[in-house]
Amino acid sequence: GRPGGGGDRMLLLASDGVWDMLDNREAVDVAARASEDGRGDPGDACRHLCDTARRAWEFKEARVDDITALLVFLPAPEAA
């Protein structure tokens, strides 16, 4: 969903080491799958996301940039 649109299920903050290798949709898809769509552990999802970015760096570059991620699950909006 759009920022503030009410349909957002997670907030994903990450360093350029993630964003240089994964686009927005890829990063969200990896985090959502790894976290079982918000039912799993956000720490495990972050580790999986960072591992995915690291593998992409190792495949595409001779170096690996710093890779950091923070994932917060957002509560479902309450029905009015």
Image: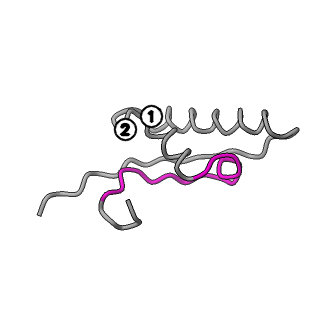
Judging by the rendered image, the residue that carries numbered circle 2 is 37
Q: Looking at this rendering, what residue extends furthest in the right direction?
A: 62
User: Residue 66: percent from the left, percent from the top?
Assistant: 74, 46
Q: Is disc 1 surrounded by few (<14), some (14 to 19) or many (20+) residues within 10 Å?
A: some
Q: Work out whether 44 lies above or below 9.
A: above
Q: Position of 25 compared to 61: left or right? A: left
Residue 71 picture location, percent across and down: 48, 47
Q: Which residues are magenta?
A: 7-23
The residues bearing labels 1 and 2 have C-alpha atoms spaced at a distance of 6 Å
Decide: few, some or many residues near mark 2? Use Cα within 10 Å; few <14, some 14-19, many ≥20.
Answer: some
Q: Secondary structure at mark 2?
A: loop
As shown in the figure, which amino acid type bears the numbered disc 1?
Answer: Arg
Circle 1/circle 2 CB separation < 8 Å: yes
Q: Does the magenta segment cover residue 48?
A: no
Residue 50, image quadrant:
top right
Residue 10, disc:
none
Q: Nearer the viewer, residue 2 or 66?
A: 2
Q: Quadrant of the C terminus?
A: bottom left
Q: Residue at x 55, y 54 (%)?
A: 13
The residue labelled by disc 1 is: 33
Q: Secondary structure at mark 1?
A: helix
- Which residue lies most toward the left here? 80
User: Image point 50% across, 35% down: which residue?
Assistant: 45
Q: How many marks?
A: 2
Picture coordinates of residue 16, whole percent (x, y): 69, 54
Q: Amino acid at mark 2?
A: Asp
Residue in the picture at 43% in, 49% down: 72
On screen, residue 36 versus residue 64, left or right, reads left
The verdict on residue 19 being magenta is yes
Q: Which quarter of the image is occupied by the N terminus?
A: bottom left
x and y percentages locating residue 59 in the rendered image = 78, 33
